[in-house]
């Protein structure tokens, strides 16, 4: 049966539209994966001499174990934001004589083959080889290596447990951040020696192989709990059950001043506020507004003037980034019906554009108090806002024409990467990296004022050419119209 499941997954993957239409992007993602593999290999082979150089009087193996606490915390957070439980279209299988336990075992087994689980091995195994060549006991190092593999799998299943427990809450990433932050604070202020406790525990397992039964027991417990959660949810009735919610009306009459795009803006605003997934775009604006507080209060970062536009683009464009990257996938549930109406596509896109522009203006006004840290910061934020309006808003709309993945608006709101493809990652290059590089180069060669002026000029150029750009973007969407309809009709 497992072999049959693999065969079905293989056919579904290569027959889907988002594979056939984005072959080049899939190839690019392979290159990204190869890049990270090379980085982790370099880390694995180079970690021992690096630690030996930094801590000449201490054992590099003990030092490495002491830092594993930080790796576990970072890995857990990265998985929570990026890794999702691999799913398969189980609804048709529920009417067939297939054991639910078989389906669940397959899904959990598939998660163990995630790239997130293989990537650490490219550092763990080379580091183990180096340790053995440096005279450490082969039995001890091999025990440590297998323990680390078990820890990687524990983090894998622990991540899914955290996601399951927080799936029904808004901003579900906050409890994880609070827990991780609390553990880090307890260790940093020497309240609880968590870092040394984890390091000592791994060293104890390495020296006494029988103790490896403890992490194995923890792994089996995490697997069993995941199995229990998924098996309880794997019912046909639960997938058919409809949820009754109270609709809250709001006065959106102010949108009428925007003319013929007002109905589309009203629909977008209702969609944003009435669905968990889209509502996160509003809540994350608060986090984006406070983003500068991670940098500006520290004198070290206030000297890095080249970083100001990057922070400004993120602060003023946080809604533009979160909402704009999934245009028109937000409407994927009823996209077929929407395209059958007698509407102008340009009006549909302009409503999205106006929402993004309004958000940039609001976020810039709210970020004005950052002038407390220096006038250059306020000027950089203003230039970033103009750049967001003139360039990034159009880049977002154009990038949306390549979206081919459906979005379920009822899924949990925060950091849900359903519907995310290579487009969303590639689009980040012109969105944030390019303006930072342009400004950094001009600031280094000429001066701060010239770099700011060029960013503002680029933004104004995009504003002046708005109508021409919208016509080309609209044509691109019309050319992709039926491809999108076909793609949004499929389950990802």
Image (tube, grey):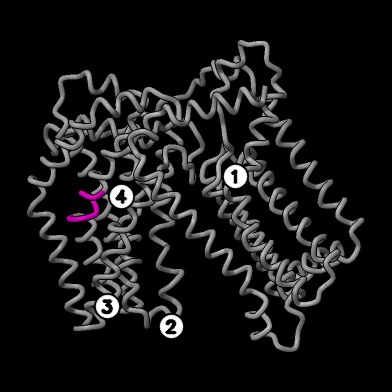
Instruction: Give the label, 3 or 4, closer to the camera.
Output: 4
Relative image position of residue 251 (x, y in whole percent): 28, 33
Task: Give the mark nearest the N terminus, 3 or 4.
Answer: 4
**Residue 310, placed above or below residue 476:** below
Q: Name the residue under label 1.
A: 114
Residue for badge 4: 320
Report if residue 73 lies within the magenta region. no
Which residue has dot 2 on it?
Answer: 299
Count neighbours of disc 4 (C-alpha within 10 A) and say few if under 14, some if 14 to 19, many if 20 or more: many
Q: If you read the primary sequence from the N terminus, does the residue marked by circle 1 or circle 3 appear first?
A: 1
Numbered label attached to residue 375:
3
| Range shown magenta | 390-395
Q: Which of marks 4 and 2 is nearer the N terminus?
A: 2
Left or right, residue 422 beside residue 136: left
Observer-side mark, 1 or 2, equals 1
In this rendering, is residue 445 above or below 165? Answer: below
SS for dot 3: helix
Q: Position of residue 20 (x, y in %)?
A: 36, 33
Q: What element carries label 2?
A: helix
Q: Do the residues labelled 1 and 3 touch (CB within 8 Å)?
A: no
Task: Work out how far the residue at label 4 is from the one at label 2, CA to CA, in angstroms.
Answer: 29 Å
Say whether disc 3 or disc 2 marks the residue closer to the N-terminus: 2
Mark 4–mark 1 distance (CA, rounded to whole Å): 31 Å
């Amino acid at each position: 049966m497992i072999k049959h499941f693999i065969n079905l997954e293989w056919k579904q993957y290569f027959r889907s539209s988002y594979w056939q239409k984005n072959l080049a992007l899939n190839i690019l993602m392979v290159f990204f994966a190869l890049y990270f593999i090379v980085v982790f290999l370099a880390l694995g082979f180079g970690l021992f001499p690096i630690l030996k150089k930094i801590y000449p009087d201490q054992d590099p193996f003990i030092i490495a174990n002491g830092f594993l606490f930080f790796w576990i915390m970072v890995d857990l957070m990265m998985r929570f934001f990026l890794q999702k439980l691999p799913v398969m279209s189980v609804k048709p299988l529920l009417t067939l004589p297939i054991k639910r336990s078989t389906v669940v075992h397959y899904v959990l087994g598939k998660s163990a083959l995630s790239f997130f689980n293989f990537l650490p091995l490219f550092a763990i195994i080379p580091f183990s080889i180096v340790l053995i060549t440096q005279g450490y006991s082969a039995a001890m190092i091999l025990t440590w290596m297998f323990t680390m593999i078990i820890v990687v799998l524990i983090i894998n299943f622990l991540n899914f447990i955290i996601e399951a427990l927080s799936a029904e809450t808004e901003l579900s990433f906050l409890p994880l951040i609070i827990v991780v932050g609390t553990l880090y604070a307890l260790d940093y202020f020497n309240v609880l020696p968590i870092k040394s406790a984890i390091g000592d525990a791994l060293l104890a397992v390495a020296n006494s192989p029988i103790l490896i039964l403890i992490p194995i027991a923890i792994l089996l417990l995490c697997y069993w709990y995941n199995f229990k959660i998924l098996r309880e949810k794997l019912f046909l009735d639960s997938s058919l059950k409809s949820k009754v919610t109270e609709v809250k009306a709001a006065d959106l009459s102010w949108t009428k001043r925007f003319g013929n795009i007002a109905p589309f803006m009203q629909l977008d605003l209702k969609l944003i506020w009435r669905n968990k997934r889209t509502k996160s775009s509003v809540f994350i604006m608060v986090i984006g507004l406070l983003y500068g507080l991670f940098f500006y209060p520290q004198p070290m970062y206030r000297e890095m003037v080249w970083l100001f536009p990057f922070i400004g683009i993120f602060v003023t464009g946080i809604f533009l980034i979160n909402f704009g990257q999934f245009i028109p996938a937000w409407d994927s549930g009823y996209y077929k019906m929407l395209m059958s109406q007698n509407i102008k596509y340009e009006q549909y896109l302009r409503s999205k554009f106006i929402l993004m522009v309004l958000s940039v203006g609001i976020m810039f006004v709210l970020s004005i108090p950052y002038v407390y840290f220096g006038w250059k910061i306020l000027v950089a934020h203003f230039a970033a806002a103009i750049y967001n309006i003139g360039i990034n808003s159009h880049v977002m709309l154009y990038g949306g024409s390549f979206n081919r993945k459906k979005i379920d608006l009822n899924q949990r709101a925060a950091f849900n990467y359903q519907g995310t493809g290579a487009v969303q990652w590639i689009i980040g290059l012109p969105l944030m990296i390019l303006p930072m590089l342009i400004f950094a180069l001009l600031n280094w060669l000429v001066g701060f004022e010239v770099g700011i002026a060029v960013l503002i000029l680029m933004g104004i150029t995009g504003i002046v050419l708005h109508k021409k750009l919208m016509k080309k973007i609209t044509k691109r969407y019309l050319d992709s119209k039926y491809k999108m309809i076909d793609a949004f009709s499929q389950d990802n």
